[in-house]
Image (tube, helix red, strand yellow):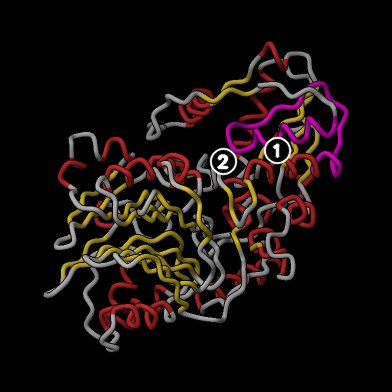
Amino acid sequence: MSTEIRGLNEECGIFGIWNHPSAAQITYYGLHSLQHRGQEGAGIVSTDGVTLKGHRNLGLLADVFKHGELDDLVGKSAIGHVRYATAGGKSLSNVQPFLFHFHNSSLALAHNGNLINAQTLRQELEEEGAIFQTSSDTEVLAHLLKRSQTESFVEDLKVALNKVKGGFAYMLLTENELIAALDPNGFRPLSIGKIGDSYVIASETCAFDTVGAEFVRDVEPGELIIIDDDGLHIEKFTEDVKHSICSMEYVYFARPDSNIAGINVHSARKRMGKRLAKEAFVEADVVTGVPDSSISAAIGYAEETGIPYELGLIKNRYVARTFIEPSQELREQGVKMKLSAVRGVVEGKRVVMIDDSIVRGTTSRRIVQLLREAGAAEVHVRIASPPLAFPCFYGIDIQTRSELIAANYSVDEICRIIGADSLTYLSEDGLVEAVGKPYPDEPYGGLCMAYFNGDYPTELFDYEKEYLASLEAESR
């Protein structure tokens, strides 16, 4: 897809299960619920207690496992991964879970997030003789793990986890145990469930509903979850923790039927819409949301204002994801193939168009244009989050401010660029209050708001500091 119309993308989704006779099949269905978190590659590794065996490939989950590959993944335990590339290229070598075979054991490794010190660690490891097989930052942990000398796998892992910095939800599978670890800030969601005597771990709770699992608890920052034949054990690899849940999980990434830190995503988005209505009311005839992630906020806006909610925009779910767009004309046509305005709903009407965010502005401009071509008299754009003005270093593919329209233009300028009659964003306080402050005693109620205000919850490393300093110099 052309970077010109590319939107926000999260890195991946992970799922694991211990002690189930259909482990690989359950993992497949769990990953299917997490497909929205990554569509570029998928893989599953299973173990029968003696060996680890895996299959992975580029593409959607159903394409990767369409020739009976699941039948070969025998055993009562498995982990799986669906990937969107933020660190590392789009090649088969970077598709996870990674599977490592050592002289006396094997290890499968899957990762959701992004390490901010991966470059430094990789250079140090290479200087010590490490040979990397991929360009993914995930492989760094495996090298650190094998270099620790505590003579205990779990202790080796704790040492390694204290060396990596940034956003990470790890899942590891050996012949004897399934292990999950969450970074000290808990940027990415990770939860534990149970199917009878089988434990499952997943990036989002929506996967539990699909596989018939009962929610047990969330994995907390700094925790190490160890599952083996004796049950579930919880340890800590660090006590230096601070909740900083990625606010964009609530705004955009997570499925509406997932719960994060006990807060339902759909309900949070509805509250965002209601708060947006209070902050940015406009006289209009209909409210419509950009499918799919903005529908909940649009319903909330409509309920609060009393303006009818209508399906003014329809998403075509059968457009090929890898649509070839060799020219500007065909790129424009590609947007129309993916999204259509409903003339019977918007013609002659003053329309409030609710969207979750504006990244580069190109897609917003084209959607406004679609509504006008369908006869909308006015198009008022309301965004259910603050302006995205700062890069993310923890697992979202926004790493430069040049990609972000809000970093380079004022709200009035953006309004003119996208061709709207008016444009208003939700305030930072409005977003925090709407989500519901899952951890009220911590900054921003336990949310990471760095994308909106540049207040990063972790120490930044040299290349981030240099980058942000260069931006500040450019703005003077």
Highlighted magenta segment, given as a residue range: 276-305
Q: Who's the residue at 43% across and 59% down the image? A: 112
What count of labels does the image hold? 2
Q: Nearer the viewer, residue 123 or 137?
A: 137
x, y (%) of residue 178?
Answer: 32, 64
Task: Locate the N terminus by quadrant.
Answer: top left
Q: Nearer the viewer, mark 1 or mark 2?
A: 2
Task: Locate the C terminus by quadrant.
Answer: bottom right
Element assignment for label 2: loop
x, y (%) of residue 236?
Answer: 47, 77
Amino acid of disc 1? Ala
Q: Nearer the viewer, residue 197 or 39?
A: 197
Label 1 sits on residue: 297
Left/right of residue 238 with respect to residue 146 in the rendered view: right
**Looking at the rendered structure, which numbered label has been put on residue 151?**
none
Q: Who's the residue at 66% across and 13% down the image? A: 343
Q: Is residue 285 magenta?
A: yes
Q: Is residue 400 magenta?
A: no
x, y (%) of residue 360?
Answer: 60, 46
The answer to whether residue 135 of the structure is visible from this angle is no
Left/right of residue 8 with respect to residue 449 in the rendered view: left
Q: Who's the residue at 39% across and 43% down the image? A: 39
Is residue 73 shown above or below 151? Answer: above
Amino acid of disc 2? Asp
Tag 2 or tag 1, which sits nearer the N-term? 2
Label 2 sits on residue: 257
Q: Who's the residue at 32% across and 40% down the image? A: 61
